[in-house]
Amino acid sequence: MVLEGVLPAGSSHLESELASTLGMSRTPVREATLLLEAQGLLEVRPRHGVTVLPVSAHDMEEIYQILTELEGLAAELAARRKHPDPEFAAAEEAIVQMDKALKHNDREAWAVADEQFHNELIRLSGNLRIASIVQMYNDQVRRVRAVTLYMRPAPKKSNSDHRDVLTAIRSGHSKKARQIHTEHRVQAGKLLVGILQKHKMPLL
């Protein structure tokens, strides 16, 4: 509900209210709110419930700095592991789905396939700690991307970048894989931060 904007930024909610809405007891709601607070999505105020926090351009700039470094490293590690061809099937299918979505200007489907590709990249790295950290920050990126999907140009370059990094990984070119994906993430971060600044958001 937070990620999809059902609970908008600045809104405050009591645990009892959330528990009633979700049809569950307060204990799992309390555990969830503490997790979301650790991810920077909520502020928990004892006896006053929770407040949904906004995401600013500065927040996204910092988050993309982290994602850029970690995913670039993941691409390098994936290339070093020299996976057999069947291991790349899911990443290849994600690219196919990205192309299909772009052809039909279905940005939501494109975003789903794009996220699947990035998840596969992390999986191929074999580093579970990178996966854990990236997942935490991806939750915040997902909030912003849901609102800005149609504010950006058609992401044709993104699809091309994904093909290039996957080719480098399959070929075992670790430094090239890292370079391609790092540059891809740098440009993606600049684009998203630029949109937030242009529209003077914090948003969601």
Image (spheres, helix red, strand yellow):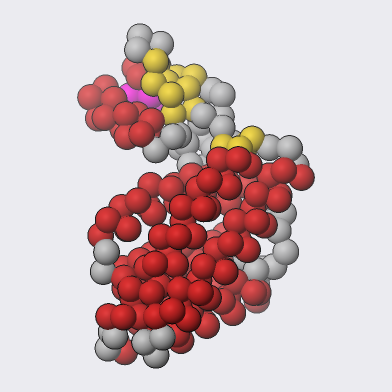
Q: Residue furthest top?
A: 47
What's the residue at 41%, 60% (across, down)? Answer: 70
Q: Residue furthest front?
A: 175
State whether residue 160 is above or below residue 57: below
Quarter assignment of residue 41: top left
Quarter assignment of residue 54: top right
Q: Is residue 109 left or right of residue 83?
A: right
Q: Does the magenta stretch include residue 13?
A: no
What's the residue at 27%, 88% (across, down)? Answer: 84
- Residue 9 seen from this side: yes
Quarter assignment of residue 129: bottom left
What's the residue at 46%, 52% (across, down)? Answer: 66
State whether residue 1 is above or below residue 99: above
Indicate the quadrant containing the N terminus: top left, top right, bottom left or bottom right. top left
Pinpoint residue 75: horizontal percent, then vertical percent. 40, 72
What's the residue at 37%, 68% (across, down)? Answer: 74
Q: Is residue 19 magenta?
A: yes
- In the image, 80 versus 133, the foreground residue is 80
- Residue 101 seen from this side: no
Q: In this view, does 23 lie to the left or right of 73?
A: left
Pinpoint residue 171: horizontal percent, then vertical percent. 39, 90
Residues drawn in magenta: 17-21
State whether residue 189 is above or below residue 62: below
Pinpoint residue 139: horizontal percent, then vertical percent. 44, 47
- The prevailing secondary structure element of the residues shown in magenta is helix
